[in-house]
Structures are given as C-alpha cells and as structure tokens.
C-alpha cells in the first residue's frame, strides 16, 4: 500500500510541477481540428497545431508529439522561429510524459539555443524550468536546482516580482513550486513549505486560482507525508474547490484522486471511495488511460481495506488489462504487488505467490532494460568521447601544422628582411664610397690646377723681377746716381713712377 502511495504521489508531483494548463476538452479539440483544416495562414496554423498538442495533455502523448512535430515542420518551412520554440516545448513535454528523458533533454537544449539566438528571455527562463524538471525526474536534484535558479535570475533581469506582467509572475511562482518539490525530495519539507508559501503569495496577489490550487495540492502532499492528515485534508479540499471552480477536468480528476487517497489513509473509506469513483468517471470522460489505471488501483486498495476482496480483484483485473494495453510496466509491477497482498489476505497463498513472482519478474525486467539502456548510453558516450578525442587530436595536429607553417613563414620573412637590409647597407656603402672618391678626385684636380697656377705665377713674378732689375741697371747706367745728384742738388729726391714692362 505504501508503495502505491508513493507511486500516486510521484505522479502527482510530476503533474503539478507543470506551470501551464493542460486541461483537455473533446469538443474544443474537435473544433480546433476543424478550424485547422480550413486554415490558410501558416503562422496561425502553427499556433493551432501547438494548441492542439497542448489540449491532448497527458492522456495521449503520442498525439501531442504528432502535433508538435507538425508545428515544428511547418515553422521551419516558413522560417517562423517563435513557432519552432512552441513546437519544441510540446515535443519535449510529450517525451517527458512518456518517460523518454534523454530525447526530451535534446529538445530542451535545441529550444534553448533558438531562444538565445533570438534573445527571448522569457523563453530562456521557461526552458531552464523544463531542463530543471528533466533533471528532477532523473533524481539529479542539484542540477535541477541550478537550472531553476538560472531561470529565476533571468526573471529578475526582466523585473522579477515587481514586473506587472502576469505571465512572468506565474513563471516565478512556478519556479518556487518546483524548487519546493526538489527540497521535499531531498527530505527538507520545511524548506519546501517556505517556497510553496512564496508561490502562494504571488498567486494571491494575482488572484490566480489555478496557481493557488497547484500550491495547495503540493502543500497537502507534504503534510500527508508527515502524517498530519487534518492539515493535509484542509489543503487538499481547498485545491479541489478551486479546481472545480476553474473547470479543468484533468486537474479536478487528480484532485479527487488525492482526496480519495487521503480519506483512505485516515480511515474514512466510504468517502475515499466516493472521491476515487468521481476521479475515475472524469478520467474515463477524458480518455486519460494512465489516470484510469491510478484510479482503479486506488479503488482496489480501498476495497481491500474494507474487506471487499472480490471487488478489489475486479478493479485490479481491469487495471492489469489496461496496463498491458498501454505498456505501463512500472504501474503493472505495483498492481501485481497489490493483487498479491489481496490474495494473501484472502488466504490464497498460491495465487499470492503467483502475482508476487510476476511483480518481481516485471521489476527485474525493468531493471535489466534500464541496465541495458545504461550500457548502451555508456557505449554511445564512450564512442562520442572517442570521436571527440580523435577530433581534438586532429585539431591539435592541424594547429601544430599551422603553427609550424607560420613559424616557417616568419623565418622566411626574417631571411628576406635580412637580405634586403644587407642589400640596402651595401648600396649605402657603395654610394658613400662613390661620393668620397668623387670628392677626392675633385680635390686632387683642384690641387693640380692650383699648383699649375702657382708655378705660372712664380714664373711670371720671376720674369717681372728680372725685368725690373734689368730696367734699373739701364737706368743707373743712363741717369746719375743718387749720391751724385745730392751733391749737386742737396735738397732733392728722385721719384720713380711705375711703368709697364
């Protein structure tokens, strides 16, 4: 019974972590499909495909995936990147519902890339939330918290709780709720309640009944786990009333199931069965086969407590048939365990052992599948890392070759620069030698000319001197001497006047 409780709680925790509404109305879906066939504008057609994917909710993840892929294909065809973002969200959620967490993570990463490229901060924050949810489903709570905090940081950049935008406020409240779920999983219910209170405060300010219903339900689960059933009942019933007011059938069905589980725990079995039947009826209307499986299991547990073993077996037989039909191995394993305990209480130990062995076999099968998947993932990871290593080595080789080529090119350039420098210096030296030689030659020629002139001048001076001396001797021969003249003319002198010779 406790394991069934944990199963139901795990399912509820997954559901109530989703921020957007996933209610499904058959008439709405039909009308949307008719409108889709008549639609001509591609961008509006993308939005209709996305809305159809949302409306299918969790009841038919394959249909959700189908519409998501169609929306993605059309968005890519017309280059509508915002449409691709919406389609990726639907596709990833479909994989999450089906438990295909690796496939979902790939889509989340692709969505994040586009959101960053077109700088849609609201979508970046939303994708951080989705990635956090994926990690939470894997039990990697630290990574989940890190992504929630990164998403909250983006919300703060957009103005945080002070921003009047209601969508942003709901997003922040959703982060608080999801962080609370992580802290609850980590065994810290007090911290979890703190974050639920923060979320509830935002929902109160906005009069967001759906946000309050989600938070009341999550708080009720915490008190339920602490066996504070009165407080849990108070919050569960508040969630039920709000969901009834909102008319979200899938959420109402889940709330009824929660109430039934709670009343069964506190011993009010008729009230518990009343709520489980209401939950079953609504899930049948919705076509929510997985939800029907949970309701049948819950009703069987109540009948077992009441001692109505045949009725319990009847519900469980239906659950087994449905579980096999939708291939819900995990849920089937728990159903086999419950029916084994019913037969044990009836004293039919042979049947009890038979179903307990089925429970163990299916459990082992899932473990083997998970192990095989883990081995396959490890092998794929090894091959990927091996390829990355090879690429890294090739890259380094290319870088080394490039570096060597650059070094060789640098050396060649240096050699050319050296040669050019030597040529330039030699040219300069030759020019200098030429100039010096020219100056020396000129100086030598000038000296030779000067020497010739000096020689000619000396010859001329000598000739003049000789002429003068010759003229003087003639003069002295013809004219009386100075002494003789002074004797005759005591107060006289001779004046010599120059004359050309």
Image (spheres, helix red, strand yellow):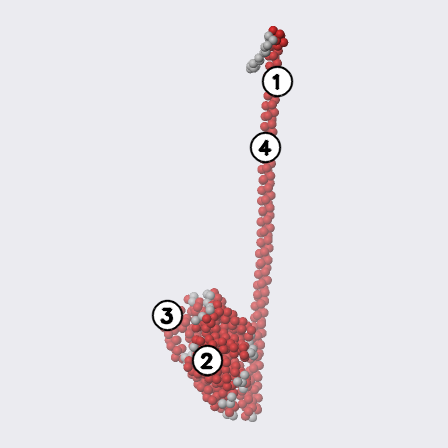
Which residue is pictured at 48% across the width and 86% down the height?
260
User: Would you name the residue on which mark 3 appears?
Assistant: 40
Lower position in the chain sequence, tag 1 or tag 2: 2
- For the question of whether residue 389 can be seen, the reply is yes
Of tags 4 and 3, the one toward the viewer is 4
Which residue is pictured at 57% across the width and 13% down the height?
496
Q: Quadrant of residue 72?
A: bottom left
Lower position in the chain sequence, tag 3 or tag 2: 3
Cα distance in 3D space between marks 1 and 2: 142 Å
Lower position in the chain sequence, tag 4 or tag 2: 2
Disc number at residue 213? Answer: 2
Q: How many marks?
A: 4
Cα distance in 3D space between marks 1 and 3: 130 Å
Cα distance in 3D space between marks 4 and 3: 97 Å
Secondary structure of the residue carrying numbered label 3? loop
Of tags 4 and 1, the one toward the viewer is 1
Q: Nearer the viewer, residue 77 or 125?
A: 125
User: Would you name the residue on which mark 1 appears?
Assistant: 462
Q: Is the residue under label 2 in contact with that under label 3 (CB below 8 Å)? A: no
Q: Nearer the viewer, residue 184 or 415?
A: 184
Which quadrant is home to the C terminus? top right
The image shows residue 18, relative to residue 440, as above or below, that is: below
Cα distance in 3D space between marks 4 and 1: 34 Å
Cα distance in 3D space between marks 4 and 2: 109 Å
In percent of width and height, residue 226 lies at 54, 83
Secondary structure of the residue carrying numbered label 1? helix
Q: Is the residue under label 3 in contact with that under label 1 (CB below 8 Å)? A: no
User: Would you name the residue on which mark 4 appears?
Assistant: 439
Which residue is pictured at 46% across the width and 69% down the height?
159
Which class describes the residues within 10 Å of circle 4: few (<14), some (14-19), or many (20+)?
A: few
């Amino acid at each position: 019974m406790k394991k069934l409780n944990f199963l139901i709680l795990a399912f509820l925790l997954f559901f109530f972590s989703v921020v957007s509404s996933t209610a499904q109305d058959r008439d709405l879906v039909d009308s949307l499909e008719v409108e889709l066939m008549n639609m001509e504008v591609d961008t509006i057609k993308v939005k209709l495909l996305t809305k159809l994917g949302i409306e299918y909710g969790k009841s038919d993840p394959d249909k959700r995936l189908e519409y998501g892929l169609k929306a993605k294909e059309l968005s890519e065809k017309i280059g509508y990147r915002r449409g691709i973002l919406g389609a990726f969200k639907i596709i990833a959620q479909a994989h999450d519902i089906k438990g295909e967490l690796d496939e979902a993570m790939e889509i989340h990463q692709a969505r994040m890339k586009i959101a960053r490229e077109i700088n849609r901060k609201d979508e970046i924050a939303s994708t951080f939330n989705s990635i956090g949810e994926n990690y939470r489903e894997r039990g990697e709570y630290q990574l989940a918290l890190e992504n929630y905090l990164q998403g909250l940081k983006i919300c703060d950049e957009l103005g945080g709780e002070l921003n009047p935008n209601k969508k942003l406020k709901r997003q922040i409240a959703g982060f608080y709720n999801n962080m609370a779920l992580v802290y609850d999983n980590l065994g810290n219910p007090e911290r979890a309640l703190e974050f639920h209170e923060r979320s509830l405060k935002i929902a109160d300010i906005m009069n967001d009944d759906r946000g309050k219903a989600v938070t009341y339900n999550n708080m009720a689960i915490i008190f339920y786990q602490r066996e504070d059933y009165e407080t849990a009942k108070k919050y569960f019933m508040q969630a039920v009333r709000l969901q009834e007011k909102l008319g979200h059938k899938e959420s109402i069905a889940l709330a009824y199931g929660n109430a039934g589980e709670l009343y069964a725990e506190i011993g009010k079995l008729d009230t518990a069965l009343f709520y489980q039947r209401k939950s079953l009826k609504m899930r049948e209307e919705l076509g929510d086969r997985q939800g029907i499986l949970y309701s049948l299991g819950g009703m069987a547990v109540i009948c077992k407590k009441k001692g109505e073993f045949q009725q319990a077996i009847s519900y469980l037989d239906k659950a087994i048939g449905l579980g096999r039909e939708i291939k819900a191995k995990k849920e089937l394993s728990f159903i086999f365990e419950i029916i084994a305990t019913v037969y044990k209480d009836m004293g039919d130990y042979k049947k009890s052992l038979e179903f307990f062995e089925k429970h163990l076999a299916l459990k082992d099968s899932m473990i083997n599948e998970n192990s095989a998947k883990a081995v396959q993932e490890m092998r794929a990871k090894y091959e990927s890392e091996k390829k990355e290593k090879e690429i890294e080595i090739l890259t380094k080789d290319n870088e080394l070759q490039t570096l060597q080529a650059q070094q060789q090119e640098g050396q060649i350039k240096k050699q050319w620069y050296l040669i050019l420098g030597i040529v330039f210096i030699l040219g300069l030296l030759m020019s200098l030698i030429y100039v010096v030689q020219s100056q020396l030659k000129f100086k030598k020629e000038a000296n030779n000319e000067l020497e010739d002139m000096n020689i000619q001048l000396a010859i001329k001076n000598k000739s003049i001197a000789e002429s003068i001396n010759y003229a003087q001797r003639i003069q002295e021969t013809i004219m009386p001497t100075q002494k003789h003249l002074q004797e005759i003319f005591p107060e006289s002198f001779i004046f010599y006047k120059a004359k050309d010779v």
